[in-house]
Amino acid sequence: MGPSDASGPRDTQALLSTAPTMEIHVERPLLNQEQLEQLGHWGPAPRTYQWRTWFQCSRSRAHGLLLKYLPVLGWLPHYRVREWLLGDLLSGLSVAIMQLPQGLAYALLAGLPPVFGLYSSFYPVFVYFLFGTSRHISVGTFAIMSVMVGSLTESMVPEEDVQQGLNSTVENSTSSDHVQQATQNARVELAFTLSVLVGLFQVALGLVQFGFVVTYLSEPLVRGYTTAASIQVLVSQLKYVFGLQLGRSRSGPLSLVKTFVEVCRKLPETVVGTMVTAIVAGVALLMVKILNDKLHQHLPLPIPGELLTLIVATGISYGVNLNKTFGVDIVGTIPAGLVPPKAPNPQLFARLVGNAFAIAVVGFAIAISLGKIFALRHGYRVDSNQELVALGLSNFIGGLFQCFPVSCSMSRSLVQETTGGNTQVAGAVSSLFILIIILKLGELFQDLPKAVLAAIILVNLKGMLKQFADIWSLWKANRLDLLIWLVTFVATILLDLDLGLAVAIGFSLLLVVVRTQLPRYSILGQVPDTDIYRDVAEYSEAKEVPGVKVFRSSATLYFANAELYSDALKQRCGVDVEHLLAQKKKRLRRQERRLKRQQKEQQKQQQKQQRKAKQAASPNGTSISVAVDASLGDLKGRDVEDSRAKVSPANAQEDVAAGGQEEARAPEASTLKALGLPRPDFHSLVLDLGALSFVDTVCIKSLKNIFRDFREIEVEVYIAACHSPVVTQLEAGHFFDASITKQHVFVSVHDAVTFALQHSRSGPSSPVLATKL
């Protein structure tokens, strides 16, 4: 952004602050949903069936799929050699200088021989060069992934079990070197089998377009998890710093606490030479990093402190013979050359499947988070699904060559970007440099003390340990995010990395549900001389429209909060709807019983009058027949007809009048006023449903109940600001019927309020200007 661009927002802000008040004049007819659909010629959006394109075959589609799943073919032919090559070479060399010591150290963290860290720094990096979409992230060994692998290798393949297995097959007890070699082989097999399984998970998730899964890992969750994992790393390296021999490796809940307690208990057994070596190496590394931070603007490349520490420490160890003289544990034999590919052990899949999925998700989350940061910074796009495929292939192919699971390193990615890296050519250069070390130079580091590698790991935790500052920043910004951070941190510390991640995700999703159950409910008022409605509790000038209540919820309405929504609505309206309805039903029943008693009394009086009329008519002979051939039935029939003819005229008029009066009084008799009940101080209720993104059957039933209950207490209900997809879902759920139509749904709150005011006056149904400001 240039200077002119930067000044743009400031100039706009100054212009708006000094400009006179601007007015908007809008005149349009009042619109409900039915009128809007007619005016806008609404029709259902055409559906697109993406699965149909999966079976289409054409040359362009084949070319597009090839470029999608092999991105290097898209950008490498357009590589700008003059502009990018020098930066990528320097960046690749700088990353390789970091990759070498970190690869050795993180292999130790994973419970494996250091050379396998070099393998994991070569194969996966080159595979990602072919399939990745990020230009700046550095794939390879990473502390979090290594500690997750280490917790498995040390717990599932403890040295004691291997020794017992060897002793049971050999008559004499085996040597410690033989036991150690067998343990390493078993752990290596478990690690590369785990890598293959992780790769399969990631590739499968990427092919089914499951890259969105990372959206469930919020930034506070990831930062809290990585901070807790850094504590796991720190505790796991204490035995190398103090030269301690701990007992059986632990995993599962409270394993970190138990390991730390054991380290503290065995501190008297510290090997002084090992501790001094670790302290000296750590101090030297810190000084170099501080120097790099101070002079980064003046140095073309950062000082390779880790590589220099490795070289110096290896030279001192070889010259002084630290291993034999001071008992400092060293790396040992580093075989030269590459190892042949080896098939994974399928028998381990069942035991590793849960941990493999957790490692796959964590590794992808870290990689895509960094990838998107760099993509936004440099103006290109990262495909999350292709990143899953690329990372999965890196782990799968790497696993076949005995690599352990890898991801993206934060520190190396920053170095790759700041030293001029433009593409993944820098990653290819760093992998080739590592290949040279594997083939020719690896054996030079056989005398490297393990305490130096532990110091490298601990110093590189500095960035993640700084994340403890999130507690203070989140306390001020968002305390619910702070709660996610703390729960993730504590769960990961106490329950181990896999269970901790599961608890963190579950808690984060639960908190989302809780947030929707505890939204902000508001009664809205109109801002003077506008069509804008805001919360009367927040805006002092916003006034409620007389006779109309406008209610809004800040969250969508669904099964988990539908009942809470109804309760809050009735509470904010200030009407005890249930009590009022109960009283109304009670008085109506009482009125009905009274009417029935009156009808029975009227019938009795009519019967008495009829009998009196018959008795009065008998002496006059009006009902005596002289027809000899008439039957008794005919006599009775004629007698009844005669009596009716003489008695009914006056009574009939009275009955008709009474019936008409009763029919006229019936509606009035059922009103709250006629029943002696208090009426609400508003005649209309407007539900602002602008926050709804979807509805379910429970929501539809709840809205129907609201319409029914408030109409029972003589309050008409309207819906406002409902989005078109929500209206479609309401229609599909049979929300609309003869009593609730789309004419009760309005395009805005102001339309609904205007209609409610006009409707209450029973005026003519002429068009109304909903907005005239």
Image (cartoon, rainbow, N blue to C red):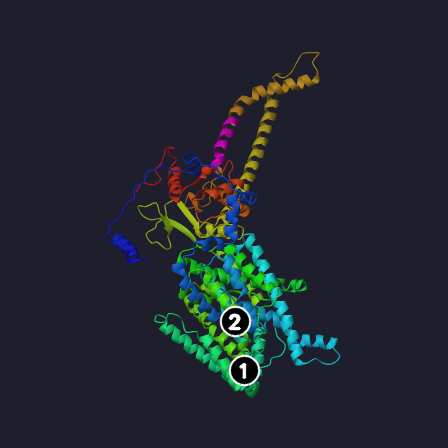
Where residue 437 is drawn, which disc sits there? 2
Looking at the picture, how far across and down is residue 326, in whole percent? 55, 87
Compare residues 618 and 370 and report the one nearer the observer. Answer: 370
The C terminus - image quarter: top left
Q: Which residues are magenta?
A: 655-668
Q: Is residue 713 visible?
A: no
Return the x and y of residue 243 as percentages of the image width and height.
56, 82
Q: For the stretch drawn in magenta, what is the main secondary structure?
A: helix
Q: What secondary structure is found at the residue carrying circle 2?
A: helix
Q: Residue drawn 39% across and 73% down?
A: 292
Q: Amino acid at mark 2?
A: Ile
Q: Residue 247 sits in which quadrant?
A: bottom right
Q: Which residue is mark 1?
A: 242
- Residue 590 rendering spot, x and y as whole percentages: 54, 42
Q: Nearer the viewer, residue 602 or 75?
A: 75
Please say whether residue 663 is one of the residues in the magenta stretch: yes
Three-letter residue code for mark 1: Phe
The answer to whether residue 663 is visible is yes
In this view, 537 is above or below 38 = below
Q: Residues within 10 Å of mark 1 (few under 14, many from 20)?
A: many
Residue 545 is a magenta residue: no
